Image: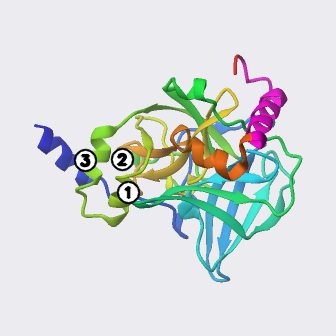
Amino acid sequence: MGDMKCLLLLLCAGVTVSTAVDLQKRIINGSPCGNEERRYHVKLIASNGKKDFFCGGSLISESYVLTAAHCWKQGWNMTALVGVHPGQPEGVTITEYHIYNDTNGNHDIMLLKLPQPTQIPYVALPNENKCSKFHKILRTAGHGATIMGPDHKRGIDRPKELHCADIPVFQCPDYKKCLQSSPYRTAQYYSYQHFFCSQSNTVDISPGDSGGGAVQNCRIYGVNAFVANGTHACVNKSGYMDVCKYMPWIKEKVGLGFFNKVSNKALSRGEGGKCLNP
């Protein structure tokens, strides 16, 4: 029975990440984010002059954006639009980036450094106490279509405003084990990484939402990474890089003293009055 379950998972585990044609991909069944809810959301645009590649990201300090590593395209120009929500974004060129790497290779989590600090409020990182508890509901966000058609097929509407949604998440070690045997290179790539999953009949992320943050009470716990079915929503698992597992690396890059300052400042600013008992 276990082998059959794994086989069924592998049949759907192509694992799709964002591509240049994913402009229509989105948060499924979300709603417009509040004006103060996601001011830290960053829209990333990689361009080679012919194609544009879109991702999301989250400000975690005045100078750093946390996002997915596959959002970086070597040799392409990377622009970060800060202040994209609720409006009046400022575009800055990114040249400095850091991707987590170990003996297995790169992981799908990345830090981008802004050329100049920003005054836009940022989201706080989890401390050790918060990481000791796994949160079963997180709130994520992205740009793109908001409807799901017949047979769960992804829609093509493209709203200008940022959409948010609460999504159930869970640990998925069996799924990770299955990815190790997948014939798909991208699935094998994720098999050694630290991620958790979501799957819902009504809410889902999509490839174009890559890099966006999964948050609870003003703290970021996940980074949107992949969907196992790129054409249909809510029919298979989606994956989020587990921020808690990468905190030592984030602290190393951002700086421990600065990290403490960042977390305290982010929480004191709040998020539209929605940060109760952070």
Amino acid residing under circle 1? Val
Numbered circle sitting on residue 245? none
Numbered circle sitting on residue 151? 2
Dividing the picture into quadrants, the one containing residue 234 is top left
Q: Could you tell me which residue is drawn at 74 percent across and 59 percent down?
A: 113
Residue extending furthest top? 277
Would you say residue 56 is visible in this rendering?
Answer: yes
Q: Are marks 2 and 3 in contact (CB under 8 Å)?
A: no
Instruction: Find out whether residue 261 is within the magenta segment.
Output: yes
Main SS, magenta region, reads helix
> Mark 1 vs mark 2: which is more N-terminal?
1
Question: Distance from label 2 to label 3 (Cα)?
Answer: 19 Å
Q: Could you tell me which residue is drawn at 60 percent across and 57 percent down?
A: 110
Residue 273, position as x, y percentages in the image: 79, 23
Question: Distance from label 1 to label 2 (Cα)?
Answer: 19 Å
> Tell me, what colour scheme is on the image?
rainbow
Amino acid residing under circle 3? Leu
Q: Secondary structure at mark 3?
A: helix
Q: Which residues are magenta?
A: 257-276
Q: Quadrant of the C terminus?
A: top right
Of residues 62 and 228, the one drawn nearer to the viewer in this rendering: 62
Above-or-below relation of 93 to 236 = below
Q: Are marks 1 and 2 in contact (CB under 8 Å)?
A: no
Q: Are marks 1 and 3 in contact (CB under 8 Å)?
A: no
Numbered circle sitting on residue 15? 1
Q: Secondary structure at mark 1?
A: loop
Residue 241 placement, left or right of 80: left
- Residue identifier under label 3: 9
Residue 148, position as x, y percentages in the image: 48, 46
The nearer-to-camera label among 2 and 3 is: 3
